[in-house]
Image (spheres, rainbow, N blue to C red):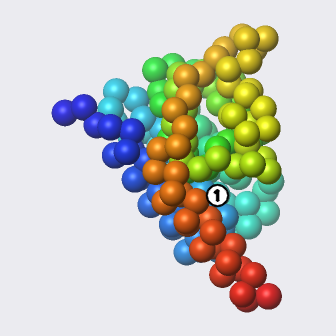
Amino acid sequence: MDKTDNYFMKIALREAKFAASIGEVPIGAVIVKNQTVIATGHNLREHTEIATQHAEVIAIESACRALDSWRLNDCTLYVTVEPCLMCAGAILNSRIERVVFGAFNSKGGTVGSLYNVLNDERQNHQVAVNSGVDAEQAALIMKKFFKSKRKKR
């Protein structure tokens, strides 16, 4: 059975919802190889007090351990929100083949919004990108989270 981008994005959305439930910015990530989930991640910056604990970085680190390699060839990263510059760098450095994301991030996204880092031909690696998958759901999770945070203030 060929699983679709929507199938794997639903898993990333579950990660995002979990992040929200523990007070983290609700971004979830999933890495898939050969139609199989090999790693997941969600933001953990608030819990760890470590700036690099973004969903994508956590998933990439987990996938590298699962494959015993820093090269994530033939892998797809699903993430609920457009990656930031740090995460785009990690994606390039890990040689991920493809990124599928949900909502655009006009303030920090570097895969179409502010920059197009993953497709810059000056880099030694380029990444195929599919954007807007379950974008409304991803954006809604973010909006609800930040609305709740503002209410508590």
Q: Is residue 69 visible?
A: no
Label 1's element?
Answer: loop
| Residue appearing at x 59%, y 50% in the figure | 103
- Which residue is under mark 1? 43
Residue beneath the point at 68% across and 25% down: 118
Q: Nearer the viewer, residue 80 or 61?
A: 80
Give 55 or 144, whichever is nearer the viewer.
144
Q: Quadrant of residue 125?
A: top right
The C terminus appears in which quarter of the rendering?
bottom right
- The amino acid type found where label 1 is placed reads Asn
Left or right side of 93 for 80: left
- Asked if 79 appears above or below 89 in the picture, the reply is below
Residue 148 visible here: yes
Q: Where is residue 55 in the image (x, y as percent from the top left)?
A: 62, 50
Question: How far from the left and from the top, in percent, is residue 73?
Answer: 51, 19
Nearer the observer, 19 or 71: 19
Q: Is residue 10 above or below residue 121?
A: below
Q: Quadrant of residue 121?
A: top right
